[in-house]
Amino acid sequence: MQQDELYATVLSTFGAALERLARSYEADDDKRRDLLQEIHFALWRSLSTYAERCSLRTWVYRVAQNVAASHVVKGRRARPEFVGLDDVGDLPTSGDETGRLDRQITLDRIYGLIRTLTTLDRDVILLYLEGFDAASIAEITGLAATNVHTKIHRIKKLLKQLTKGESHGA
Amino acid sequence: MARDEWNDLLSLWQTQTPDSPFPKPDDVRRLVGKMERVRRRQRWDFCVALMLVSATIVALALIFDHPLLRAGAAASLIGFAFLTYEILDHSRRSPRPENGEVPSIQYHRALLEHGLAFHRTRLWLRVLSVAPGGVLFFLGFAAARPSLAPVIYVELATFALAVSLIVPVNRKAAAKLERQLEQLEHLTDVR
């Protein structure tokens, strides 16, 4: 398949997910647009060497995640305070926001949580939210499947804590 | 959290409306092409600038026959050749993504380490490769054309200032790369 066709496939299949990925790595609107553009450029270039050694999905996510991680590294002057899933502290809950919790607040909280995590944990939580199973996440991230299972368990607990009370507010 | 709630959450995540329309393949191809042209142009500009400076130095050395000027010109050309070799060699040894595969974090780390090695090592050698030749050239030029000496001394001072910045500028660049490497380690420390 030609580079153009591959890229068109990437856009139609993963375009929205790439935007969510960029949003998970960069809160600032302008910088996020720059990051998304960097990701698209890197994907475009990389597709010329795509030889189907792995699935297109794996390829796309690996390129995008590496560009995003590099973006974070380049963009920060001070030492970033990223933590692993096990070190995430108390998360805000929606118990005191009954009646006004909406989709956006929930999403903002999830993005807020993701942006505090180390790259690998970000990747796992993002892929989990995108609907990937543990085996696919392991393939993309290079983690052992058991390790992914452990992380997913922790992610579920965090997300549960994060969205606790939503049903009361709805 | 019940299965339905998980599904709702995943659905909420996956059905977010994109902020902006996706870029068109033609636009991406055009922009990537433009960026690559700019990069090639920068390399070309560097070569042209180097050739022009070298040609000017040689011309001045031939026009104004003074031994100090000629010695300075010769030393400067050798210094430029050394600097050019350093830059080209650094570029040639630059890490490449493994087997043309996905550029990885390891690749990005290797790039940072490669850049760090360039900005951290042989700094004084680079200074010494251009400083003596430049100083001799300007002093010889001033001796050959005493009427222009004040202007030439100002140029010498400017040259000395530029050369004196080689070490601090490289150290600053190295510190930036070290910081990025440290952040990369921190970002990926569980990998």
Image (tube, coloured by chain):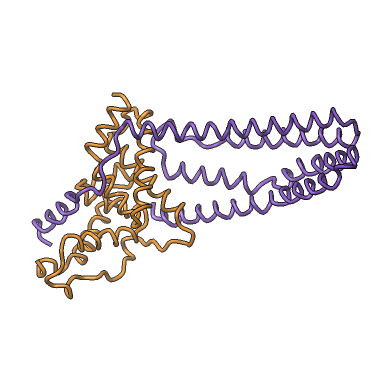
Does residue B4 appear left or right of residue B49 in this picture? left
Q: Which chain is orange?
A: A
Tell me which residue sits at (38%, 52%) in the image: A31
Q: Is residue A21 above or below residue B70?
A: below
Does residue B155 appear left or right of residue B123 in this picture? right
Q: Residue furthest bottom?
A: A96
Image quarter of the N terminus of chain B: bottom left
- Image spot of residue B8 (x, y percent): 12, 55
- Tell me which corner region of the image, top left, top right, bottom left or bottom right, holds residue B115: top right
Q: Which chain is purple?
A: B
- Image spot of residue A68 (x, y percent): 37, 48
Q: Is residue A152 above or below residue B57?
A: below
Tell me which residue sits at (29%, 32%) in the image: A7
- Image spot of residue A25 (x, y percent): 34, 53
Q: Residue furthest front?
A: B147
Tell me which residue sits at (28%, 71%) in the image: A90
Q: Nearer the viewer, residue B155 or B73?
A: B155
- Tell me which corner region of the image, top left, top right, bottom left or bottom right, holds residue B66: top right
Does residue B94 appear left or right of residue A155 in this picture? right
- Image spot of residue B134 (x, y percent): 79, 41
Q: Nearer the viewer, residue A15 or B24?
A: B24
Q: Nearer the viewer, residue B93 or A111?
A: A111
User: How many discs mark residues in the rendered view?
Assistant: 0
- Tell me which corner region of the image, top left, top right, bottom left or bottom right, holds residue A54: top left
Q: Is residue B116 above or below residue B60?
A: below
Tell me which residue sits at (62%, 47%) in the image: B119
